[in-house]
Image (cartoon, rainbow, N blue to C red):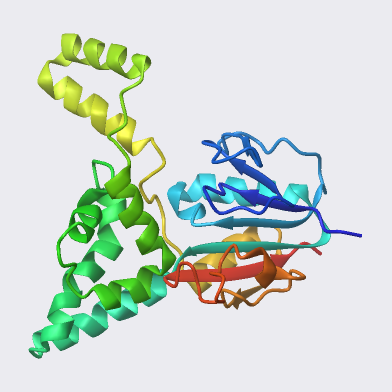
Amino acid sequence: MSLRCLNLGCGERFHADWVNLDIRPAGPAVQQWDLARELPFPDGSFDVVYHSHLLEHLSKSNGARLLRECFRVLRSGGVIRVAVPDLERIARLYLEVLDKSLAGDRASQGRYDWMVLEMYDQAVRDAPGGEMLAYLRRDPIPEQAFIASRLGGELRRILASSSSQPAARRPLWNLLTRKLARLALGRRGIQAHDLGVFRLSGETHRWMYDRYSLARVLTEAGFQMPCAKGAAESAIPSWAGFQLDTEPDGSAYKPDSLYMEATRV
């Protein structure tokens, strides 16, 4: 019997044999769904639930709510797999490059700015791409090999999308609400409106996780036996063949990730 698998917030990385959900579907194999709502499935519908670099875009409380929904739709004995930016690794690398930068190491001084961006930019940015995108548009990109070791295939995607996509046009509702904000509060009203719309767009990071906190929030949602995994390592049968966390050559798509699995007993 084939497994029934669910991929939440899949973006452009999905498998046609899975049930894939995203608020902006990237293809006909993806169903449109806002994950702020309850999942549209009965209890115990899936053998596997997976989401990658989704949880950090939710507030701590909303992330916990989503994990409870994942628990609800997972059958007994099923597996949840979660990938998030690895806060522990970011913090350790930051301290390493800080110490070496203070000691005069030139390579570390070049990496220092990037590690600060990894920690803060996606949490505090107020425009699409933030300072991280501006950094990656530099020619040449400082310490590009180091950044590639952190971002993997995501670096290629960022560079390709930033150079090929035109600026998005504002939808009609956005133009109307901006006009109302300007009438009510002047230019500061427009600034506050645009910032609010962007901050609610889902691009920013709302929380971060390490091995301890991710295991704890999974346990609090009802899961048992949380365990960190490698990109190609999983209790999910034939996991590597789906190429969701890996490239065709087996390397990690997002090497900066913490991967963790747990079960519903």
The quadrant of the rendering that contains the N terminus is bottom right
Residue 225 appears in view: no
Camera-nearest residue between 68 and 159: 159
Q: Determine the residue positioned at 51% across, 67% down.
A: 213
Instruction: Identify the residue at horizontal 24%, vertical 54% (top origin).
Output: 133
Q: Position of residue 86 (x, y in %)?
A: 43, 70
Q: Is residue 82 above or below residue 89?
A: above
Q: Quadrant of residue 172?
A: top left
Q: Quadrant of residue 97?
A: bottom left
Q: From this viewpoint, which residue is outermost toward the right?
A: 1
Q: Residue at x 56, y 66 (%)?
A: 245
Residue 58 pos. (x, y %) = 47, 47
Q: Is residue 178 visible?
A: yes
Identify the residue at the far front of this view.
164
214 and 170: which is toward the camera: 170
Q: Position of residue 248 (x, y in %)?
A: 57, 70
Q: Is residue 22 above or below residue 106?
A: above
Q: Quadrant of residue 85?
A: bottom left
The extreme left residue here reads 104
